[in-house]
Image (spheres, coloured by chain):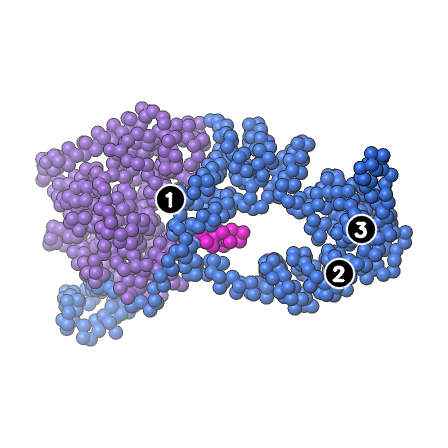
Amino acid sequence: MSRKPFSTDEVLALSPDDASAKAARGLVAPGKWPVLGASDSAVWGECQGSGSKPYQTQVDISGAGPTFRCSCPSRKFPCKHGLALLLLQAQDAAGFTAAEPAWVSEWLVSRKERAEKKETRASAPPAAAEAADPAVAARRENKRFDRMGAGAQELGLWLDDLGRRGLAALAGQQDKAQAMTARMVDAQAPGLGQRLSQAMTLVGKGADWPARVLERMGKLQLLVDATLQRERLPPSLQADLRQALGWPFERDEVLAAGETVTDRWQVLAQGMAEREARLTERRVWLHGGQSGRRALLVDFSYAGKAFEQGWLVGQCVAANLVFYPGGDPQRALLAAPGEAVTPPAGPDAFPSASQAADEWQALAHRMAANPWAERWPLLLGAARPLRRDEGWALHAGGRLLPLALSDTDGWLLLAFSGGRALELFGEWDGAVLRPLSAWVTGENEGWSTSSLGGEGA
Amino acid sequence: MTAWHSLVQAVLVGSDKPWSLPAGTGSGADAVDRLLRDTYGLAAPDAPGQLLRVAGALALCRQAGWQAPTATLAPPALAPVETRHPAGADWSSLLADVLEHGPQRLQLQLLQAMARAGLHAPPRLIPALLRLGRSTALARPDLLPVLGERGRWLAAQNPEWAWACGVGESADSTTHWEHGSLEQRLAVLRAERVLAPDAARARLEADWSGLAAKDRAALQGVLVTGLSAGDEPFLTVQLKDRSSEVRSGAADLLAALPGSAYAARMAARLAPLCQLAVARAGLLQRIAGLAAPAVSFEAPLQKDADWKADQIDGDLPKYESLGERGWWLYQLARRGSLAWWTGHSGLDAAALVKLAASSDWAEALLRGWHHAVLTQPDPDWAEALLHSGKRRHAQPAPLLALLTPGRREAWQLAQLDEGQLPPAALDACLASVGASDCWGAALSLRLAQLLRQLLDRGALLNDYALRQQMPDLICALHPEALVDWPDPPRSDDETPGLSDSLNQLEQALSDRRRLLQLISTP
């Protein structure tokens, strides 16, 4: 499949942050790149770094979106070299004349093999190995749930003590809460610990902190209750519980148990966030053109390793998605690398928001179906961003929504809107909306950011 | 009190104290109320975790039923429709690059080109343009059209970008004049003096008596711009100022007004010192009627009592290299009108300077005229004085600035051919070219040759100043000089610093070429 070089804007949209974009621009100098080449399936180049050996940078463009790989030690993804390579191509594709070196062909072959293997795995009868001895698997699962149950019990005692002594006593309790968080990791229920430490970060912040901490602690209590009576819950809620406790499903488990949806998926937004050191989380939000389903793909990349599949906001991909089991399936897996398809042109280029009231109604249902979800996709129509003294807000349906936006992104969004009503997509966390993309129906160019902010995973 | 509030109150003090839901809760009025009742009824209020459990159930319901507060603010008005053409992808991507890494000269050149081409920038570059305008006042005239309606609309919503909204600007200048620093006051006065010289003078005159001597002297200097006969009364008052610095400045300015009473008094003093004589010409010249008149210069024989009122100092200062009579002549030359000299002698500046240089009073006259030409800008005099001897002018820049670009560059080219070397030559050339301009073709070609020699010799390795200047120099070269400019030599063992500066050089070169390409293809 041949495609024209990415435009400068498309490349910059892939940048994990402003600093990377800036660094990449600094490398857009042909003299820096003794070797530059391109084929229908890849773009490659050698970039003179500070060391004696040049970095080998390559981008697989055969898939739906570009996939990067670079021999540099950067933990940004994609790194500045990958971005600079595509920027150079955008500027002057004629200079990409080098023949395909072995390090490129080998990588492409290995990627293809991996993709094929995955496909066979996906089409094979699910989880043959696991099926061999379901008893063993069940026993292992029960053992872990026992351990998580013990942790939950301990946390329950701590919470009860907190409730009895009152929130006012929390102020000096950071150490004890930290010890409890560590205990939850030992009990293999890191999700409990994470929610506890997130609640603790709110203590003493702002006048209404007791109410906000109470919300969190109350929900944590429900999570503890649910863990202790797991067997009585319906299977879908059990699946949500397991993930909320911090025991994610393995790919095979999802492929075996999840619902498969075939559709043309439109990329609504793509966000990157640096988690612990050297770990990058990527969240891609998709919208199914026929099914109307919204799906979230979550990937992690460690130490700048390439993500399996690249995505571009606005692009349309025909693919099978397998949804994670649960009461409100939202997170999904890509069963096999998708194939880019021409996105519908004209007014259907992006989905239009339904009536605002319907969107909020649907959101309430999703919350009821999975009470432990921490963020939800929200698509609002006729939305006008605005700046007030306290920060950014969204004027929609006669109401004013608080927005979580950096100043840089905020001014860009406002510049894009020009006071017009936008379709705006973002992540809602129950209190604040984090806008990730916005567009005007019928227009090609939109606004998007890949910044997920600094909130914890 | 709502159920939620009572729960928050209860949890603050702790469930060891008795707590309950407010009366009326749990009557089953709606689904949430029933859920609350059922959860509350699950166990006694002091059962383990019961308070948090009830709060958790209610928190989830509140989260699901949350409604944003009704907007009390109106949404921003719609930005006006653009009247200019949207910049195409090639202009936009170049603008993004150039905004990102400069140099400033290229930013100004690009903005100027876009302003001339009737283009406006895409929305995603507007915040960066507004930030540029905030830090670089020089860029504002061309930024304003390029920002387009959307840009001005956005600027109106951020007080930091008030410069782009017409209203903010005049409010600014009033505040700056009344409450600003000396720098800000100078800027206000300079700007007004260009547009409305009389109003600017009136503004200064109104404030004059309350100003400190240092501020009076600094602000007085602004009057050199747009100087006219209308300024004479105010300057004449200043001739009696308490501060000697102000008196001296007033005298310089009055001398620059040919019709002023001061200039007439100076002319009367100078006339006897500049004697016309017909030189003995050779036979051929006499036949051709080319017998050039000549002048001889004299210095005053004694000081005059009325000099003092006109700021002529009769006493020789300490450490003055001139003798007493030379000192007198220097001051008279400095405060004389340059136009009087040419008018009186019938000679042009070049001839007068040449004659003076070979006379006994060379230093007094040349120093005096050099001083005079700074308040009486005249390209002929400036050029004549420049040629009169480089040693006298450690700082040729002020004189160079008075020349027309063509003559300035011819002079600089001559300097380069005489072997003047960087960095002095480069600094001088950069100092005399406007912030967004480039040099003429001849000077550029010569400079490009010089720069390439420097690069080939590896000058960037240790010359940190040159590293900094390189991108700017590239953009100050005439397009013709860039045609054959080769990529700089690269090698594997570059230090990271050198590598960075070579990248910047290549980047500037490539961006500049892209701009030239865009300008040449309408």
Q: Which residue is mark 2?
A: B260
Q: Are marks 1 and 3 on the same chain?
A: yes
Q: Are marks 1 and 2 on the same chain?
A: yes
Residue segment shown in magenta:
B133-146
| Residue B366 relative to residue B424: left or right | right
Can residue A431 be seen from the camera position used here? no
Judged by its main secondary structure, the magenta piece is helix
Q: Which residue is mark 1?
A: B89
Can residue A419 be seen from the camera position used here? yes
Residue B84's spot in the image, x, y percent?
41, 53
Mark 2 lies on a secondary structure that is loop
| Residue A109 relative to residue B516: left or right | left
Which residue: 19% across, 37% down? A336
- Indicate the quadrant where residue A311 lies: top left
Q: Quadrant of the C terminus of chain B?
A: top left
Q: Nearer the viewer, residue B376 or A402?
A: B376
Which residue: 73% across, 55% down? B256
Q: Residue furthest front?
A: B287
Q: Quadrant of the N terminus of chain B?
A: bottom left
Q: Which chain is blue?
A: B
For the residue marked with disc 1, what is the amino acid? Ala
In this structure image, what is the colour of chain A? purple
Where residue B344 is drawn, which disc sits there? Answer: 3
Residue B303's spot in the image, x, y percent?
88, 55
Badge 1 vs badge 3, beta-carbon distance below 8 Å: no
Q: Nearer the viewer, residue B187 or B389?
A: B389
Badge 2 vs badge 3, beta-carbon distance below 8 Å: no
